[in-house]
Image (cartoon, rainbow, N blue to C red):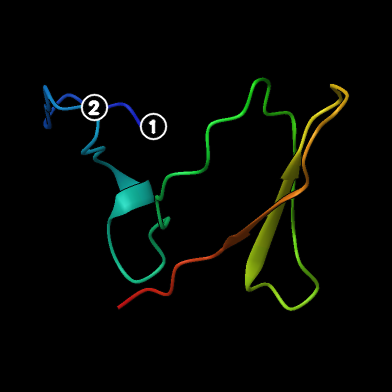
Amino acid sequence: VSQPNESQSSDDPSKPEGWQTEGDQAALIFNLPNRRQGESICFSSDGKRLWLTSEFIPTPLLEVPVPIRN
């Protein structure tokens, strides 16, 4: 989450402000599933999904669709 600069302030951390959230190239922020220890993440070869896992056994391999910007 980005930090507000001096000219901006937000008391709501779910609404980050700054260059990461403005304009056509802004980051797309979305929730991921809860994991015991999230340490591995990668994009699928087509860029439409994320793969998430961890080092604990057993550890599921989670597939998350990447949201499409409206």
Residue 27 percent coordinates (x, y): 42, 55
Label 1, on which residue?
1
Whether pointer 2 and pointer 1 mark residues with C-beta atoms closer than 8 Å, the reply is yes
Q: Amino acid at mark 1?
A: Val
Give the crowd class for mark 2: few <14, some 14-19, many >=20 residues within 10 Å: few
Front residue (pair 23, 47): 47
- Which mark is first along the chain, 1 or 2? 1
Label 2, on which residue?
13
Disc sitting over residue 62 in the figure: none
Q: Is residue 26 left or right of residue 61?
A: left
- Identify the image quadrant of the C terminus: bottom left
Front residue (pair 43, 11): 43
Q: Secondary structure at mark 2?
A: loop
Q: Look at 12% across and 32% down and name the residue there.
A: 8
Q: Look at 38% across and 59% down and name the residue there.
A: 26
Q: Look at 45% across and 67% down and name the residue there.
A: 67
Residue 48 percent coordinates (x, y): 63, 73
Front residue (pair 40, 22): 40
Q: Amino acid at mark 2?
A: Pro
Q: Is residue 60 left or right of residue 19?
A: right
